[in-house]
Image: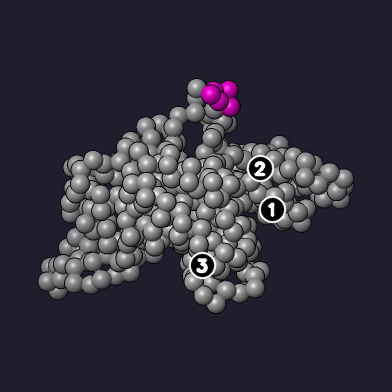
């Protein structure tokens, strides 16, 4: 990657900050899902795909749906089975075109080829016609619609499954998911917190409808990754890959090449042009075989100094907390439903706690946030 600027532009930094604000907003609705949101943020910056592994009932669909809503689009969501037909994903046949013009094509409006974010549950359960088409859509961002090869706007495809497939015929498809994360149940260790979140949802707290960052900005940020300065981490990355291969870890050439893009995305997410060893953290999730996951995590930890989750961010400056508070305050008006107002209030109170912890003594800032909370609370009382 070449032509590294001295720093990212102000619009790029603002877009990255809004993406992270989206992650914090979605996190309010879940327990123990910060690692998944860290990976989703990196994935949309790198335009890569994520595989979530775990049993049903762990909130994977809701997590992706809420996150995608903040990207300004409805995600394309489907549960796949061995009986799923291609038309259920890619669209029905355009019968009028076939009858009048003799042209075979499908209508893709509202289907996966028109989606910016897609979530496919039980992603390995479908048949070869679907998997073969998905390979092209995911890797080349192209959908072959009859005689035409149409570009698709897909930013990321998130797949979910209980486990990785053992069928060798599915390995090429599974390899398209560069990032993998186990999503276990959390009730055993955090039951009270889980019940509290469930109570809030039962009161009608809906998904985030505010667009924090749009597909056009994500497309621009994805192109900016080519300008990240990876010079300081490329030797570390090379040694990491060499060590893993030497320990028998399976890494395809595709994964090795695209791994550097994950490092660039982590640096951009940290608002840095020049990547540092800590930006290797997403690589803890680019293993192919689950049996190799502990080996990969440990090797990344030694070099990045992290556990494979997103690194702890430094305390945010006061002006950034105020900008986010003002943005939250503008999300609701007199006509907003109570559930939306309640959601914004929770996020504003979280910001106020962060402000008191990281910037105690900033009386003017605390008063402004308190004023925004009071105005939002008044909306709830009038609803």
Q: Nearer the viewer, mark 3 or mark 1?
A: 3
Q: Which residues are magenta?
A: 189-193
Residue plotted at (29% across, 45% down): 123
Residue 327 placement, left or right of 278: right
Callout 2–callout 1 Cβ contact below 8 Å: no
Q: Which residue is mark 3?
A: 225
Residue plotted at (49% across, 28% down): 186
Q: Nearer the viewer, residue 249 or 218?
A: 249
Q: Which numbered disc, 2 or 3, marks the residue that appears first in the sequence? A: 3
Give the structural element (helix, strand or loop) at label 2: helix
Give the structural element (helix, strand or loop) at label 1: helix
Q: Nearer the viewer, residue 150 or 36?
A: 36
Residue 375 placement, left or right of 225: right
Q: Which disc, if any, is residue 19?
A: none
Looking at the image, residue 238 lies above or below residue 190: below
Percent across and percent down for residue 108 are: 29, 61
Packing grade of label 1 (10 A; few <14, some 14-19, many >=20) is some
Q: Which numbered disc, 2 or 1, marks the residue that appears first in the sequence? A: 1
Task: Characterize the magenta stretch by its predominant secondary structure.
Answer: helix
Packing grade of label 2 (10 A; few <14, some 14-19, many >=20) is many
Queried whether the magenta region covers residue 80, the answer comes back as no
Residue plotted at (54% across, 61% down): 233
Q: Which residue is mark 2?
A: 347
Q: Nearer the viewer, residue 178 or 73?
A: 178
Looking at the image, residue 316 lies above or below residue 53: below
Q: Which disc, if any, is residue 324?
A: 1
Packing grade of label 3 (10 A; few <14, some 14-19, many >=20) is many
Callout 2–callout 3 Cβ contact below 8 Å: no
Residue plotted at (27% across, 56% down): 134
Q: Quadrant of the C terminus?
A: top right
- Give the Cα separation between the discs numbered 2 and 3: 30 Å
């Amino acid at each position: 990657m070449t032509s590294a600027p001295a720093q990212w532009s102000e619009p790029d930094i603002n877009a990255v900050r809004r993406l992270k604000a989206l992650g914090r907003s979605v996190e309010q609705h879940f327990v123990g899902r910060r690692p998944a949101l860290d990976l989703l943020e990196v994935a949309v910056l790198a335009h890569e795909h994520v595989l979530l592994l775990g049993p049903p009932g762990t909130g994977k669909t809701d997590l992706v749906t809420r996150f995608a809503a903040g990207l300004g689009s409805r995600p394309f969501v489907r549960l796949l089975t061995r009986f799923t037909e291609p038309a259920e994903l890619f669209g029905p046949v355009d019968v009028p075109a076939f009858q009048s013009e003799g042209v075979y094509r499908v209508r893709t409006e509202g289907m996966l080829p028109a989606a910016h974010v897609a979530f496919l549950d039980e992603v390995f359960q479908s048949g070869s016609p679907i998997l073969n088409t998905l390979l092209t859509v995911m890797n080349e961002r192209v959908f072959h619609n009859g005689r035409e090869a149409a570009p698709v706007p897909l930013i990321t495809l998130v797949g979910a499954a209980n486990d990785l497939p053992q069928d060798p015929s599915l390995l090429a498809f599974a390899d398209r998911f560069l990032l993998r994360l186990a999503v276990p149940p959390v009730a055993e260790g955090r039951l009270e917190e889980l019940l509290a979140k469930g109570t809030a949802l039962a009161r009608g707290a809906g998904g985030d409808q505010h667009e924090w960052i749009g597909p056009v900005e994500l497309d621009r940020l994805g192109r900016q990754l080519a300008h990240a300065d990876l010079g300081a981490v490329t030797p570390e990355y090379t040694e990491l890959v060499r060590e893993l291969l030497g320990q028998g870890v399976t890494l395809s050439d595709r994964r090795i090449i695209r791994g550097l893009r994950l490092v660039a995305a982590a640096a951009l997410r940290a608002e840095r042009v020049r990547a540092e060893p800590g930006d290797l953290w997403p690589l803890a999730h680019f293993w192919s075989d689950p049996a190799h996951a502990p080996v990969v995590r440990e090797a990344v930890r030694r070099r990045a100094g992290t556990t494979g989750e997103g690194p702890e961010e430094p305390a945010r400056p006061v002006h950034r907390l105020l900008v986010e508070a003002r943005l939250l305050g503008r999300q609701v008006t007199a006509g907003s439903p109570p559930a939306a107002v309640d959601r914004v209030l929770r996020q504003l109170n979280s910001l106020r706690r962060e402000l008191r912890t990281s910037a105690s003594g900033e009386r003017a800032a605390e008063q402004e946030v308190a004023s925004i909370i009071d105005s939002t609370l008044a909306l709830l009382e009038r609803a």
